[in-house]
Image (cartoon, grey):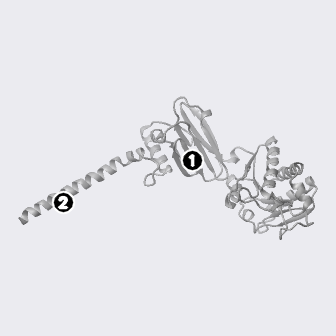
């Protein structure tokens, strides 16, 4: 009886070993196929891992060769005009949408290419989200049913690059006086500035932290100049007295980073140029350039930065001026003149 039990136990153990080995073999052999069947789940490959895996498979089988960084097969008959591409410079996020495809499209038609300068990659439901390590401009073309993508730095396209920030926005209104919010004044001036820059025939690339009523983080604002490799960074604000009370104090001042070198194409020099050009354009009092290292976006900017306080919302005359479209256009003209002057000086 005891020997039968031992034989039975040995048989069970052998069966368990065989089953376990078979399961491990199945997992190793078909694991990659499982990734293909159910991409995107947390326990499986990331977007970058999928890109690497499928590219290796394609290279081994000599299925496709291309010089561009990324490539994906499109639905039959789809052209470039049907593919939706958005570039969020502030987040360094490039989004590609292929309309009218199912959830498993990128399983049957995987994205191929290199992950150079790509920090993160997400694919689902006809949407590819590519988070880059800096600001890039996507170059896209469709050929033989495939979408090819390359990513160029702004310096590869433009002679000069600038970054522009409209202070506050969204749920951060800034100063509020008589129902007027600073964020709206700042944005109105920046929109006027954008019109001027859009009409300029020089090869200047311009990157804005916002052109709508949104509120990028301080970090996103401060890093845009560096991520875009900008020659300079200008932020536009409207001033107030410390106590927030209406007063006779008025005028324009420009803040700079006093802890960085003042030699050459510095934050200090850019601030002085902005001060001179803006006060000349709007006829405001010159309150000079002031220390600004305590301000996050000034302290953390990797490029020469100037923060322009156009006028005082706590001064009734200047508040009326700041809300006037004509005055906003003059302020924008002053900033525009400052930008051109700074670039001409060598920034």
Q: Is residue 224 left or right of residue 102?
A: right
Tag 1 secondary structure? strand
- Percent across and percent down for residue 144 are 54, 30
Q: How many numbered discs, if any? A: 2
Q: Is residue 315 left or right of residue 23?
A: right
Residue at 70% across / 43% down in the picture? 157
Residue 304 visible somewhere in the drawing: yes
In the rendered image, the vertical position of residue 251 relative to residue 59, given as above or below: below
- The CA distance from mark 1 to mark 2 is 49 Å
The residue that disc 2 covers is 13
Q: Is residue 100 left or right of residue 54?
A: right
Crowd rating for badge 1 (residues with CA inside 10 Å; few <14, some 14–19, many 20+)? some
Tag 2 secondary structure? helix
In the rendered image, the vertical position of residue 176 relative to residue 35, given as above or below: below
Q: Is residue 121 left or right of residue 13?
A: right
- Percent across and percent down for residue 180 are 82, 57
Q: Residue furthest left?
A: 1
Q: Quadrant of the C terminus?
A: bottom right
Q: Nearer the viewer, residue 202 or 219?
A: 219
Residue 347 visible somewhere in the drawing: no
Q: Are marks 1 and 2 in contact (CB under 8 Å)?
A: no
Q: Earlier in the sequence, mark 1 or mark 2?
A: 2
The residue that disc 1 covers is 129
Residue at 60% across / 42% down in the picture? 150
Residue at 76% across / 58% down in the picture? 167
């Amino acid at each position: 009886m005891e020997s039968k039990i031992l034989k039975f136990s040995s048989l069970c153990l052998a069966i368990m070993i065989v089953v376990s080995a078979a399961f491990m073999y199945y997992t190793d052999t078909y694991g990659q196929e499982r990734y293909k069947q159910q991409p995107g789940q947390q326990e499986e490959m990331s977007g970058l891992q999928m890109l690497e895996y499928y590219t290796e498979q394609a290279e081994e089988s000599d299925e496709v060769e291309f010089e561009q960084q990324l490539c994906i097969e499109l639905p039959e008959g789809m052209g470039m005009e049907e593919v939706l591409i958005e570039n969020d410079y502030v987040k360094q996020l490039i989004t590609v949408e292929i309309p009218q495809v199912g959830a498993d499209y990128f399983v049957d038609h995987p994205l191929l290419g290199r992950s150079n300068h790509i920090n993160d990659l997400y694919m689902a439901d006809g949407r590819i989200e590519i988070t880059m390590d800096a600001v890039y401009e996507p170059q896209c073309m469709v050929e033989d049913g495939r979408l090819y993508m390359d990513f160029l730095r702004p310096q590869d396209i433009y002679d000069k690059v600038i970054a522009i920030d409209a202070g506050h926005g969204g749920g951060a209104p800034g100063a509020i006086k008589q129902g007027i919010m600073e964020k709206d004044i700042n944005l109105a001036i920046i929109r006027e500035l954008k019109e001027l820059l859009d009409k300029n025939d020089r090869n200047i690339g311009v990157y804005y932290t916002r052109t709508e009523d949104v509120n990028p983080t301080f970090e996103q604002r401060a890093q845009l100049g560096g991520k875009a490799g900008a020659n300079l960074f200008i932020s536009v604000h409207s001033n107030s007295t410390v106590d927030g009370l209406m007063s006779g104090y008025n005028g324009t001042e420009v803040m700079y980073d006093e802890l960085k070198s003042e030699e050459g194409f510095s934050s200090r020099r850019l601030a002085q140029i902005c001060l001179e050009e803006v006060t000349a354009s709007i006829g405001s009092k010159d309150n000079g350039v002031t220390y600004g290292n305590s301000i996050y976006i000034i302290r953390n900017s990797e490029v020469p930065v100037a923060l322009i306080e156009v006028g005082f919302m706590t001064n009734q005359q200047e508040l009326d001026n700041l809300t006037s479209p004509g005055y906003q256009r003059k302020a924008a003209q002053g900033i525009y003149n400052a930008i051109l002057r700074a670039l001409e000086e060598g920034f």
